[in-house]
Image (cartoon, grey):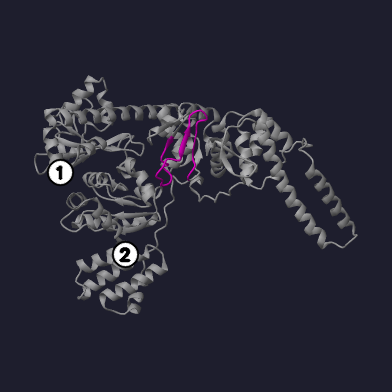
């Protein structure tokens, strides 16, 4: 995958992405001598074991043993593929990638950068209006009434658009933004002057703004008199807005959302995911709610593994995005019929992505926002923890909304349950819910099974994940190297002199650990070919997360092993002697193992036979060699 990008471009991106700056944007780093530390984001811990080395541009956690360079961190923290990590760092550094160098790609990238800038700037303006201007008073009163804290307003960058037709238009002019570009951003609407504006239609469908090419264009604001929620992508960049009406005609749309633009596709965006993705990874499941205020209330009350689809029904693309972070979702929509029907409509996309589905029902008349406000985050967390499986929920809902004592009602329940469970293609589930349905309807399981077999709905084919890559494959368990082998790894990355000695004197067959052999082989090869370009580049050449973590651990550790085979912190007054001692012990263990194998083989051979005599000679030579100091290898070993 990295072959799509030249090594030179990767190096340019790496050089522009200081690892302390990048990781510091995700975690609160504290200086510890020459390095930085933090609580590890990859496992739960109470004291910091996560170490960032600015000199070597690597990170390593001594608790879970994750380690690597800046690309590895972004990939693992964001739970994305290597290419996506490269793209994100390239975008941050404003470095174009090779496949973006065509005139069309460059133009597209430039347009996206301009739109991102405009969105960020207008978000700042609306934040300032909410905080400081008279035009934001109505929005301030509304947020106070809804119990939205000042911290939440700041965290989610909530703002207010004034009740004016031309505020954004005039703001754009003052910033020298081309109005056609601002219209592409979805912030204003342009119409021919002979076509009077229709607020609702134009706000919801920009294509309704039909123009007369012979007539001058009149621009006016899309968002007016609304509470503004910025919509961010997974990197936290503002890509769109959702505006809630604060006053006005009941016919006016309650919410107006940004239209789709080059940077905003509703079916690929979750509100809040930029802030909740780490919590989702830690919890192992995602809560899906309906609205921004639901999410904000839950998030600020401690339930942070939560997202909301943005201005559209739940789609297969939404399901693929969630699948990158978790294998289970808990649907928690409003308790009214519209919310409960939306839960049912979500099933197909969730099943197709292989997600397990549970449903948390908020007791009427509450929605998640009002429930959390009245009962607190802990009670909401309990509600989620006790959420029932989707098919149990669906059976209960069908029985509650249909008259199961009538033939018509029973037929509806049977048909609906059959259609739903057959979508899983799971025979055990189908039989389980045939029995449960029979119990609820008061009929025999055999009769329900027979009905379920009639005209079953075809199984939904799993949707291929376009973001899936080899990096997401299940990791193999790391085989721990011996302390002596690990000690050699620590020293071999200190100086070229140590690498030269290891190259001349150490046979890699002496090492039991496959990762250590691979690392030493690559290090020696780069030394001999004079191709060493630094530790981050070396980690990339390994193309193996287990080996990469072993290297970062070796480089980050400050101890070696003493003669009693115990770890200890100490200075290294004679590191070369340490290296020799470690090598002698590794060789000794290898030779003793070989001696045992030869002794075992000799016992199986006929006494005095040519084969046994050959084995005896090999035993004698090996025993003699074991007593000698290390000698240069002939020929050099790769």
Prevalent SS, magenta region: loop
Image-based side of 522 in relation to 445, left or right = right
Secondary structure beneath dot 1 equals loop
Residue 557, which numbered label?
A: none
Residue that numbered label 1 is attached to? 146
Residue nearest the observer in this picture, 416 or 524: 524
Stretch in magenta: 37-63
Image-based side of 611 in relation to 224, left or right = right
Residue that numbered label 2 is attached to? 391
User: Residue 413 in the image: x percent, y percent?
Assistant: 26, 69
Q: Locate residue 423: give its quadrant.
A: bottom left
First in sequence, mark 1 or 2: give its number: 1
Q: Quadrant of the C terminus?
A: top right
Magenta segment includes 45: yes
The answer to whether one can see residue 493 in this image is: yes
Task: Report the residue at 65% width, 31% height from top.
Answer: 574
Image-based side of 188 in relation to 317, left or right = left
Instruction: Give the Cα separation between the discs numbered 1 and 2.
Output: 34 Å
User: Residue 419 in the image: x percent, y percent?
Assistant: 33, 65
Task: Give above or below for 202 relative to 452.
Answer: above
């Amino acid at each position: 995958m990295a072959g799509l990008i030249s090594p030179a471009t990767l190096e340019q991106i790496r050089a522009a992405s200081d690892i302390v700056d990048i990781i510091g944007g995700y975690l609160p780093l504290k200086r510890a001598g020459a390095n930085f530390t933090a609580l590890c984001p990859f496992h739960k811990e109470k004291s910091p074991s996560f170490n960032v080395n600015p000199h070597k541009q690597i990170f390593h956690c001594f608790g879970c043993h994750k380690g690597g360079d800046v690309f590895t961190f972004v990939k693992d923290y964001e739970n994305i593929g290597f290419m996506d990590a490269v793209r994100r760092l390239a975008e941050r550094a404003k470095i174009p990638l090779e496949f973006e160098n065509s005139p069309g790609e460059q133009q597209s990238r430039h347009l996206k950068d301009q739109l991102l800038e405009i969105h960020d700037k207008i978000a700042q303006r609306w934040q300032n209006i909410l905080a400081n201007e008279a035009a934001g008073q109505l929005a301030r009163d509304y947020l106070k009434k809804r119990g939205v804290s000042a911290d939440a307003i700041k965290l989610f960058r909530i703002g207010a658009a004034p009740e004016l037709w031309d505020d954004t238009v005039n703001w754009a002019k003052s910033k020298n933004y081309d109005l056609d570009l601002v219209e592409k951003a979805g912030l204003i609407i342009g119409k021919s002057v002979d076509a009077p504006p229709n607020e609702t239609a134009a706000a919801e469908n920009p294509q309704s703004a039909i123009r007369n090419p012979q007539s001058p264009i009149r621009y006016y604001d899309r968002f007016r008199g609304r509470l503004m929620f910025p919509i961010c992508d997974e990197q936290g960049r503002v890509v769109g807005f959702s505006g809630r009406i604060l006053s006005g005609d009941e016919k006016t749309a309650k919410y107006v959302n940004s239209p789709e633009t080059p940077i905003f596709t509703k079916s690929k965006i979750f509100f809040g995911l930029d802030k909740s993705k780490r919590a989702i990874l830690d919890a192992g499941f995602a809560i899906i709610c309906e609205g921004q205020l639901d999410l904000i209330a839950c998030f600020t009350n401690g339930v942070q593994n939560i997202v909301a689809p943005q201005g559209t029904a739940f789609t297969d693309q939404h399901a693929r995005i969630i699948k990158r972070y978790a294998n289970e979702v808990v649907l928690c929509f409003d308790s009214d019929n519209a919310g409960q029907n939306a839960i049912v409509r979500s099933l197909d996309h969730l099943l197709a992505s292989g997600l397990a589905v549970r449903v948390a029902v908020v007791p009427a008349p509450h929605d998640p926002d009002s429930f959390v406000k009245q009962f607190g985050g802990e009670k909401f967390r309990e509600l989620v923890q006790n959420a029932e499986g989707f098919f149990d929920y669906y059976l209960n809902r069908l029985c509650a909304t249909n008259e199961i004592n009538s033939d018509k009602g029973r037929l509806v329940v049977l048909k609906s349950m059959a259609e739903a469970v057959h979508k899983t293609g799971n025979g055990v589930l189908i039989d389980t819910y045939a029995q449960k349905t029979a119990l609820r309807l008061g009929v025999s399981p055999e009769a329900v099974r027979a009905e379920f077999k009639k005209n079953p709905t075809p199984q939904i084919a799993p949707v291929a994940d376009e973001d899936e890559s080899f990096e997401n494959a299940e990791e193999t368990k790391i085989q721990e190297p011996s302390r002596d082998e690990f000690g050699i790894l620590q020293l071999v990355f200190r100086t070229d002199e140590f690498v030269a000695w290891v190259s001349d004197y150490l046979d890699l067959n002496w090492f039991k650990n496959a990762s250590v052999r691979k690392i030493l082989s690559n290090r020696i090869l780069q030394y001999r070919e004079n191709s060493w370009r630094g530790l981050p580049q070396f980690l990339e050449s390994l193309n193996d997360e287990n080996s990469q973590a072993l290297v970062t651990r070796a480089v980050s550790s400050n101890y070696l092993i003493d003669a009693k085979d115990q770890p200890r912190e100490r200075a290294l007054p004679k590191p070369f002697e340490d290296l020799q001692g470690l090598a002698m012990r590794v060789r000794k263990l290898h030779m003793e193992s070989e001696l045992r194998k030869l002794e075992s083989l000799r016992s199986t051979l006929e006494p005095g036979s040519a084969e046994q005599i050959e084995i005896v000679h090999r035993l004698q030579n090996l025993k003699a060699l074991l007593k000698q100091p290390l000698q240069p290898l002939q020929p050099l070993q790769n």
